[in-house]
Amino acid sequence: MKIDKQRLLDGYRTMRVIREFEERVHKEFMTGQIPGFVHLYAGEEASAAAVCQQLGEYDTVASTHRGHGHSIAKGCDVMGMMKEIYGREGGLCGGKGGSMHIADLDVGMLGANGIVGGGAPLVCGAALTAKTLKTGGLSVAFFGDGAFNQGTTLESMNFARVYDLPVLFVLEDNGYAESTASSWSIGGHDPVRRAEGFGIKGARVDGHDYFAVYRAAEEAVAAIRNGEGPRFIHIEFTRYYGHFEGDAATYKKPGEVQDERRYLDALKFFRARTTGGGMLKAEDLDAIDAEVDTLIDAAVREAKAAPPPALSTLTTDVYLSY
Amino acid sequence: MSVKSIREALNEAMRDEMRRDPTVIIMGEDVAGGMGAGGEQDAWGGVMGVTKGLMPEFGRERVLDTPISESAFIGAAAGAAMTGLRPIAQLMFVDFFGVCGDQIINQLAKFRYMFGGKAKTPCVIRTLYGAGTRAASQHSQCVYPVFTHFPGLKVVIPSSAYEAKGLMTQAIRDDDPVIFFEHKAMFDETGEVPDEPYTIPFGVANLTREGKDVTVVAIGRMVGFANQAADALAKEGIECTVIDPRTTSPLDSETIIASVRKTGRLVVVDEASPRCGLASDISAIIAEDAFDALKAPIKRVTPPHSPVPFSPVLEDAYVPSVADIQESVRSVMGSGASARVLEGAD
């Protein structure tokens, strides 16, 4: 089915928000004002944007340490996210979570996760809730190529299969688990075949191609909603920055990053394809660019101006009652 | 009110809560038994038969046998709790937390705090603990101090059939994650248990007897041992207060402190390993808050710092005994074999 114009514009806007958000966090991190560990999603935007476009209010996602993109795509408030990353009052988690633990259960975002492979079992639980309470919802586990070698992920794939849970497993393969190449670390070198070993149908797509991701996700989600149980998508793309902010990424070949930005950019591809083919007008995309720049500027400004959390919150929210 | 075993008391608590609340589900390895097999369904009802009869009443949609994948199903319980169910997950033996620890300590325990108070994860993890059944090193440990260590978890250790039902009902209704410890040697112990549902609040210790001379704090199965020791000591003229904290997180330290302020002496009996255990923790609390009240050094009664052995002779020597407790009480009273180290303390 043809993707209508508004959905294309929405998809572009999500990718553009993620890109600008990450570029600004990268820049601001250099100033030393952002505490802790930050892992950036720049280069991977099409996955979060196109997959989450298939989801509705009863659907949930679990994310990874590299979670800003999924959070934005699932509808987390960008202002609240930026404040959280700065560790300020008014952050989505009150400044208690930070970049690695951004969550908003109200929009079905079950959390970024500081543990590689931590999310897939949680997604099985969310899917079990949806199945038990008959909400019609499904749950998406985004995980990286590192997590694809964690027992939690593999156990969850089996668990989702034996209970036919409505789960979409999305392997986001950016080529590196920290500094280790996924071409080496994924034994068998064929993730789709590995998924098929669990009885889960899979597809492999180019993650720099919004349309390819959109089609694969659309097909998988339709099958899951049709009661066919879990599906798997292997999305290949590149991350522009290191594993974490401060990682010089010397394990990449010289020139690899520049070439990636030149030749492997989902936003450039999207613009060329949609405007070249007459689907969208360049000025529509320009208008989104300008609006997003203003939004992210405002988010950074507000985050920097926000006070730190009150010290009285140090020991709140550990329990509901104790 | 009728006489029930701990097994029956726990079964009744879960059954009643499942009848009351359709969001309560049970999941774990062999919680019914026979899944996918051609023979008897509900063949096991859990490895100790505690959940027997629940699958026939509530169906496989609410009593889920899982593959042997602790990370997946304990994590799924956490995810289900976060999204609207009240799962009771059975981690068959607590020793197996080694293969799913992350899902408990880094996920389940921390959602509420990490997410700024927005998550609610009402989840009960039932688990077997304790030595005495010749189950050896990987099926006999008492790792409740590990879970007590982690903020965000509540830790419950019932000592009788009455406590088991009331604490389990509270655990299921509680909105925080609860690790519920069941001693594998105690399921057939019986006691008077009300037939109707009731709750026992967490963080409220139970004084099973009161005496003026020594405060004995005991955990789980050791509560019964401490009461037996106190009975024998009473015949020697030593009167013990025995305190069952019921929950180690929250811990009712006020009751323990108040008692030590009356007796001036403390013996802590803990089946867990001695280092960084509950005995050490409670001793530290008293040393910090009631040092001035102490008439004698605090005494800890624990197993040695070794894995749990298999051979019956060795295992019997490993587990703290009623005689060990009596000996420690006598020693803090300044009499008995250890009296010389305490000369002048009283």
Image (cartoon, coloured by chain):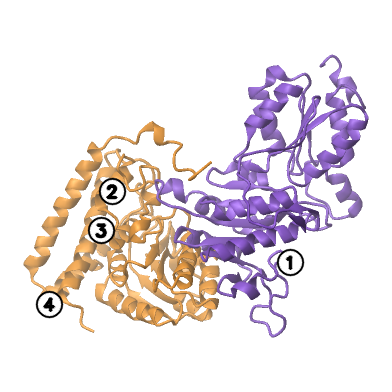
Q: Residues within 10 Å of mark 1 (few under 14, many from 20)?
A: some
Q: Amino acid at mark 4?
A: Met
Residue A117 visible at all: no
- Looking at marks 3 and 2 on the same chain, the residue that comes earlier in the sequence is marked by 3
Among the 4 quarters of the image, the one containing residue A130? bottom left
What x and y, as percent, mark residue A48? 31, 65
Q: Residue under circle 1?
A: B49
Residue depicted at 65% across the width and 68% down the height: B29
Q: Give the amino acid at mark 3.
A: Ile
State the orange chain. A
Res A117 label = none
Residue A88 makes an appearance in the image: yes
The secondary structure type at the circle numbered 1 is loop
In this rendering, is residue B146 above or below B137? above
Residue A80 numbered mark, or none = 2
Between disc 4 and disc 2, the foreground one is: 2
Do discs 4 and 2 belong to a common subunit? yes
Q: Which residue is mark 3?
A: A18
Q: Vertically, is A214 above or below B210?
A: below
Which residue type carries mark 1? Gly
Which x, y percent locates residue A14? 23, 63
Nearest to N terminus: mark 3 or mark 4: 3
> Label 4 neighbourhood size at 10 Å, few (<14), some (14-19), many (20+)?
some
Which badge, 4 or 2, comes first in the chain's sequence?
Answer: 2
Q: Report the Cα–Cα distance between label 1 and label 2.
A: 49 Å
In this view of the protein, which residue sits in the foreground, B342 or A200? B342
